[in-house]
Image (cartoon, rainbow, N blue to C red):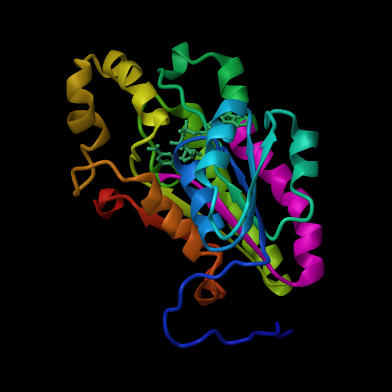
Amino acid sequence: MTTPYAAPAPYAAPLDLAGRTALVTGAAGGIGRACALRLASAGADVRAVDRDAEGLDALVGQAAGLPGTVGPRVLDLTDLDAAEQAAAGTDILVNNAGLQLVRPIEDFPPDVFHTVLTVMLEAPFRLIRGALPHMYRQGWGRIVNVSSVHGLRASPYKSAYVAAKHGLEGLSKTAALEGAAHGVTSNCVNPGYVRTALVERQLADQARAHRLPEDRVLTEVLLRDSAIKRLIEPEEVAEAVAQLCGPHAASVTGTSQVLDGGWTAH
Ligand code: NAD
């Protein structure tokens, strides 16, 4: 079976997503906010989903004047039925929302493990499930899953996060195989440590778990395996997400696009 394919211009043109709708989860902060602003800068109309209403309000203010729009949608992704419904009719889906707890397995609270898996694996499944009918009908869709180096590598004390991200990698590849005949791509983006609240919040936990003073955590734990010794900026991740939505990425599917400063080169 062949899928219709319109070749893009053979040179780099600015990304144009005018007329596309995009749903970004975890859009009130960090990487999600950067993704929402990047996609709206390219002309997309963005549904910004988060449980943080204040953060979404701030995002809407920041998006004023961009070519595309940003519409806030306050939603806790543990409400899986609501998550699935929210994804109906979107052309681009960015599964980004996430949370982290750094704790040895024997001390890891089972309820937190369950919440991490729900928000970071089951909600993406339900969002993809909600988005696919429209994408399949129109023969075009882009799913980008914000995974992590921890989708490819483990670190101690992050059992729930590593398990969720490894699961997300499998979900993403399965969606790629099923979506291919319908013009739908699915990929992961895999950053190392990014300068966001999620990282700032874990410095104290990491210090406790590794028995180190907090000021040594960045260099001795977080950036230990990165050849480039700096945090990645959220905008660098957003650019990778946006490029996967562009015309030159039509054949890129089932991949894990690593932005890790050389971590996985070891
Ligand atoms: P962040 O904490 O800055 O933002 C996460 C957002 O998700 C927040 O706005 C939060 O309100 C939202 N969220 C969390 N639980 C939710 C729920 N139940 N319902 C709705 N929204 C919810 O974190 P970030 O660093 O921007 O992380 C975004 C994604 O990037 C995550 O999937 C994370 O695993 C991934 N990631 C982050 C890093 C990093 O170093 N920061 C590295 C690799 C991957």
Residue shown at 26%/51% (left/top)? 261
Specify the quadrant that holds the N terminus: bottom right
Q: Is residue 235 left or right of residue 79?
A: left
Number of numbered callouts drawn = 0
Q: Which residues are magenta?
A: 119-148
Image: 16 above or below 163: below
Picture coordinates of residue 201, whole percent (x, y) = 38, 22
Residue 52 shows up from this direction: no
Residue 58 shows up from this direction: yes
Quadrant in the picture for residue 112: top right
Q: Is residue 24 left or right of residue 249?
A: right
Image: 156 above or below 41: above
Quadrant in the picture for residue 76: top right
Residue shown at 70%/85% (left/top)? 4
Picture coordinates of residue 107, whole percent (x, y) = 45, 11
Does residue 58 belong to the magenta stretch? no
Q: Which of the two residues, 87 or 153, is positioned nearer the viewer here?
A: 87
Residue shown at 78%/35% (left/top)? 82
Report the predominant secondary structure element of the magenta stretch.
helix
Q: Is residue 261 left or right of residue 134?
A: left
Image: 31 above or below 1: above
Q: Which of the two residues, 254 or 86, is positioned nearer the viewer here?
A: 86
Q: Which of the two residues, 69 or 242, is positioned nearer the viewer here?
A: 69
Does residue 133 belong to the magenta stretch? yes
Q: Which of the two residues, 82 or 113, is positioned nearer the viewer here?
A: 82
